[in-house]
Image: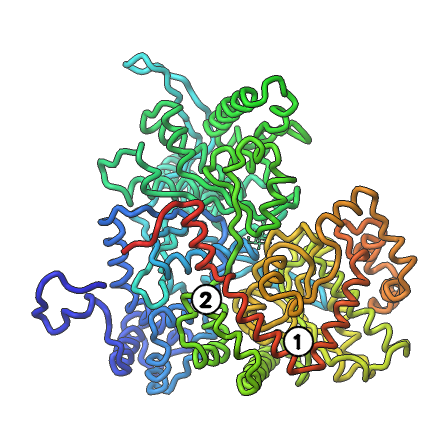
Amino acid sequence: SFGPASTPTHPLATAPVGMPSHSVDGFVREFLHELNTNQGVTLSRSSVNDQYLALASTVKNYLMARWLETGRKTREAKAKTIGYLSAEYLLGRQLGNALLATDLNEVASKGLELCGLDLATLRAQEVEPGLGNGGLGRLAACFIDSLATMDVPCIGYGIRYEYGIFRQTFVDGRQVEQPDTWLALGSPWEFPHPEASVQVNFGGHTEKATGADGKERTRWVPAWNVLGVPYNYMVPGYLNGRVNTLRLWSAQATKAFDLQIFNSGDYAQAVRAQTFAENISKVLYPEDSTPQGKELRLQQQYFFVACSLRDFIDNELEEDFDLHNLPERITYQLNDTHPVIAVPELMRLLIDEHDFAWDEAWEVTRHCFNYTCHTLLPEALEVWPTELLGRLLPRHLEIIYQINEEFLDDVREAFPGDEIRARRMSMIAEHPERGVRMAYLATVAASKVNGVAELHSQLLRDKVLPDFSELWPDKFTNVTNGVTPRRFVKLANPRLSDLISDAIGSGWVTDLERLKELEPYADDPEFKEKFREVKAANKTRLTTLLKARDGIELPDGHLLDVMVKRLHEYKRQSLKLLHIVSLYEQVTSGKLSASDLTPRTVVFGAKAAPGYKIAKDTIYLINKVAAKVNAAPELEGRLKVAFPANYNVTLAEELIPAADLSEQISLAGMEASGTGNMKLALNGALTIGTDDGANVEIRRLVGDKHFFLFGMNEPQVAELSAKGYDPGSYYQSNEQLRSALDLILSGHFSDGDQHQFDSVVFNLLNEDRFMALADFQSYIDAQAKVEERYADQEAWTRSAILNVARTGYFSSDRAMRDYLQRIWHTTPMI
Ligand code: GPK
């Protein structure tokens, strides 16, 4: 699709300018050239890091012509762009994905071999950009991958945190956070453009002034400002020649700011000012689903949103573009409420800087934004104190007040006399302090509001925003999440990918519903044998990695039971733990013979927010229980608990392909969607799960027989909650549960200290907000069914293959198609 416009005359004219040759020799030349010119070393003197950086540059060179061409093509077509606004992008390593997108794996591997180097070793050198906490950030990364692969113009906008999500270490079993120094050894994937920096203002006050035309205007007189420096990253589509852009902003001190202070002679103060400005993009807040409402966080949000809006208007549109038509050229997707300050910012730009009337500006604004909600937890819904907002962004607070007034007028018109309703729907909360409910602002401004799985979207309408869905039923929609099959199947699981492609061809990588064609193979003995061999080989690969990475020994031939996700009470790692403690208790007390256990290794991966006490104590308890279980001679070869530290995208890519059992055990109605559940099913793990989030849809698609359902459903949870939940009654009446809890209380796992785990156990016994005890017995029963199925390897394999064959729906390509049709109203290019 990049053919020349005129008859080629130069021998190189058929390749886009700058595109190196796809031959092994060509690759080697390019690689050595990069090593010499970029790293300044010869091959014989180069370090592994030199080699990795040179390899990254080499692969980039293959993408460069396509990237430039994509930009040109998109601008020329004046195509509508998706502006994905997200405070987090959990990208994972870039090199493997870039090699995949350019089909350079084999060439690179052979070329490096000629140099005496090993591709896998160089790939392992990369530190992943961990610029997100968990599901929300990873979803953003999957979405931009899919949009590029589907040839949809998209710019991902976000923050270039100097320190991403912390590196988790365990010291005597307790989580200790270390800074994530992902930039320390070089950052070959980014392209800084300081010349395109944007100024962002903060603080000060507003003034009213009457212009020569007699109109009164508001002027924001800010007190200080910083510079946003854009760093561009390539987002390559899969084998389609499109390379979109991810633009992350880094904060710097402005010249004016500096000069003023330097001139005053206070050198030290000037340098401090620099640090102050740079702090804005210094670190990712490590709270997942529980924002802390810190001033710096609001600064971060406004900083990246202000840069992003300004960037598009100034750099992507024609100079004479009429901003009344802005919705034809961009649709902003608000990834949760973190970027919602973009709404008053666009209003401000249009009114204060482009002289729009209020109504005109509102008309444009409400057509530019859509909002995705990712949670139901009340504590996750952001409310910014008006005191803070007014101090940091006085003009924006004024605009929010006016949006709210006009909105409440509409409410009063729709429901005359219902003042209580108007109060309920106000964007301004009065308690515990006056604050702006960002989810309400987002909902009012957005054309469409969506949840991330069917159940979640339903609960969003019925429980979180019922008044809004009554007022605007058509505004609400659902788009069930998805994951990219490129990274999470093709790249992470090459053995399974080859097996699938041998059976049904390779079209599934961009058309995942084609996995359906695997269904007949679920009864093909030869295919089933190969499928088991793939799983076994992936376990061996994981065993090798964990030995080297953590010194963990994984036993052979175990059922691999995987629970990987952020540590959160609602996700109920404690329930999994009670299962393990119970098995241990029964065997060590002689109630159960170890030989009756299905040999099983439980693998946890989970980071806890640094200030989240119960979550951190749960990590400690898991490690303490693991130590006892792994040391018990009775359980040797029967039960093992592994908790490798620092679960991240890189580790996920190793763990997920090896998993047999996927733990998705949140309390029903709490997990908005989940996406790990999709990745695991697609890689042939069976799910044990509650009727929550996307589990509901996974179960419907794979069939009840191939999914281990347990626990209360959401209406049952609501009912129990309404009648009054008493966790103690489950402790009293369930002998097995009581024995497990008593063993923890006895100090058995804490060297005799009976109070070590009070925060976790007393909480379960007295409050148990997420009803782990209520679902315990049902969970244990479902685990028995798991063991029964696993004992019949033919039946298990059949279920596993059907999980793969029936979960093609969960591709993020499908999710992007849904957004395109239901929300963005645009189509791919070409
Ligand atoms: C939801 F509200 C939040 C948040 O702050 N961070 C986050 O990762 C997750 N999420 C949900 O918890 C998951 O259920 C969901 O799959 C994911 O967002 C993507 O939608």
Q: Residues within 10 Å of mark 1 (few under 14, many from 20)?
A: many
Camera-near label (1 vs 2) is: 2
Find residue 512 and name its label.
2
Question: Which residue occupies the extreme top position in the image?
Answer: 214
Q: Residue at x 50, y 70 (%)?
A: 516
Q: Quadrant of residue 150?
A: bottom left
Q: Is residue 169 left or right of residue 261?
A: right
The answer to whether 678 is drawn above or below residue 770 in the figure is below
Residue 450, horizontal then vertical, whole percent = 52, 45
Residue that numbered label 1 is attached to: 560
Q: Is residue 110 left or right of residue 392?
A: left
Does mark 2's beta carbon lie closer than 8 Å to ligand 1? no
User: Which quarter of the image is occupied by the N terminus?
Assistant: bottom left
> In this figure, what is the number of numbered marks?
2
Q: Is residue 369 left or right of residue 169?
A: left
Q: Residue at x 55, y 36 (%)?
A: 438
Q: Is residue 72 visible?
A: yes
Q: Amino acid at mark 1?
A: Leu
Badge 1 or badge 2: first in the primary sequence: 2
Does mark 1's beta carbon lie closer than 8 Å to ligand 1? no
